Image (spheres, helix red, strand yellow):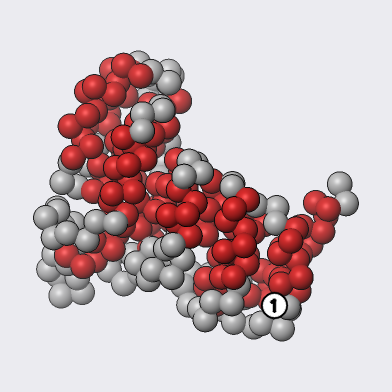
């Protein structure tokens, strides 16, 4: 995870394997899994299982994780707190998003084979922006909107806004359709479809001659994304 730290994290999260083992593990067993897992993408799967169990009694034992030096592991614990209704969770994730300090564990390795602090800061902040989408707290919308031009995290912001599902994100996303990077235009289109943003249709039609293509992954071109989005939104309109 050296060059583009943002996009690979999305792929890791999308491909993470579900927790295996006995059906319906106890809260104590889930806590043991959470505490023993060091790969943050796999630990997040355990965190989701803890949230699904809806057992507030786990929070006191997880409190030390809210200050863990590994920001991604800290974020996973904060996600549990936030989804279980404890306001500390949201605050911790927002804190990680704004944190550029050097005092942190560094796991990202540079092309020279050395620990890369700037890369770690970028990964930690990107993951925090991702977690705001997972948290689905509308208070995250203005915070994320302010990061639509932040090069460390902007590629995940449209996805997170779509996951939160708050309509106040629609206008900033429509404005992002004018971003100079084709990747951001495509990601904004996807988020607008997620938000069922009918008001975006006029601007989407203006993109039907935009042949820009993202320079990461195998994403479709802007015009292809716009065509698909228009078809989806128009079909929603006639239902």
Q: Residue at x 21, y 35 (%)?
A: 65
Q: Is residue 102 left or right of residue 210?
A: left
Please, is residue 53 above or below residue 208 in the view?
above
Q: Between 136 and 52, which is closer to the camera in this rendering?
A: 136
Q: Between 95 and 66, which is closer to the camera in this rendering?
A: 95
Please, is residue 165 above or below residue 35 in the view?
below
- Asked if one can make out residue 155 in the rendered structure from this viewpoint, the answer is no
Q: In this view, does 65 lie to the left or right of 227?
A: left
Q: Quadrant of residue 193?
A: bottom right
Q: Residue at x 23, y 48 (%)?
A: 71
Q: Which residue is drawn at 27% across and 31% down?
A: 34
Q: Residue 203's spot in the image, x, y percent?
A: 71, 72
Q: Which residue has dot 1 on it?
A: 207
Q: Furthest residue to the right?
A: 238
Q: Quadrant of residue 16?
A: top left
Q: Residue 42's spot in the image, x, y percent?
A: 33, 41
Q: Quadrant of residue 33?
A: top left
Q: In this view, does 161 lie to the left or right of 205?
A: left
Q: Residue 227's spot in the image, x, y percent?
A: 74, 70
- Asked if one can make out residue 67 in the rendered structure from this viewpoint, the answer is yes
* SS at badge 1: loop
Q: Is residue 90 left or right of residue 32?
A: right
If the image is split into quadrants, where does the N terminus sit?
bottom left
For mark 1, does the 10 Å Cα neighbourhood hold few (<14), some (14 to 19), or many (20 or more) residues?
some
Q: Which residue is drawn at 45% across and 40% down?
A: 135
Counting every numbered tag in the picture gives 1
Q: Between 49 and 143, which is closer to the camera in this rendering?
A: 143
């Amino acid at each position: 995870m050296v060059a583009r730290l943002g996009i690979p994290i999305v792929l890791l999260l999308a491909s993470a394997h579900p927790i295996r083992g006995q059906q319906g593990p106890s809260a104590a067993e889930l806590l043991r899994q959470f505490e023993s897992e060091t790969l943050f993408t796999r630990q997040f799967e355990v965190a989701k299982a803890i949230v699904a169990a809806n057992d507030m009694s786990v929070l006191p034992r997880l409190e030390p994780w809210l200050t863990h030096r590994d920001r991604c592991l800290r974020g996973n614990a904060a996600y549990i707190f936030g989804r279980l209704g404890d306001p500390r969770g949201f605050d911790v994730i927002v804190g990680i998003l704004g944190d550029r300090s050097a005092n942190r564990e560094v796991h990202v390795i540079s092309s020279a084979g050395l620990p890369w602090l700037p890369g770690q800061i970028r990964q930690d902040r990107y993951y925090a922006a991702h977690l705001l989408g997972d948290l689905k707290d509308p208070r995250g919308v203005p915070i994320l909107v302010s990061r639509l031009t932040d090069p460390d995290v902007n590629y995940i912001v449209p996805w997170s806004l779509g996951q939160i599902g708050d309509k106040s994100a629609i206008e900033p996303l429509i404005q992002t359709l004018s971003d100079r990077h084709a990747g951001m235009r495509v990601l904004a289109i996807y988020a607008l479809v997620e938000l069922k943003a009918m008001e975006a249709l006029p601007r989407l039609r203006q993109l039907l001659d935009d042949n820009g293509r993202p320079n990461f992954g195998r994403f479709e071109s802007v015009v292809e994304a716009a065509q698909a989005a228009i078809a989806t939104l128009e079909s929603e309109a006639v239902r």
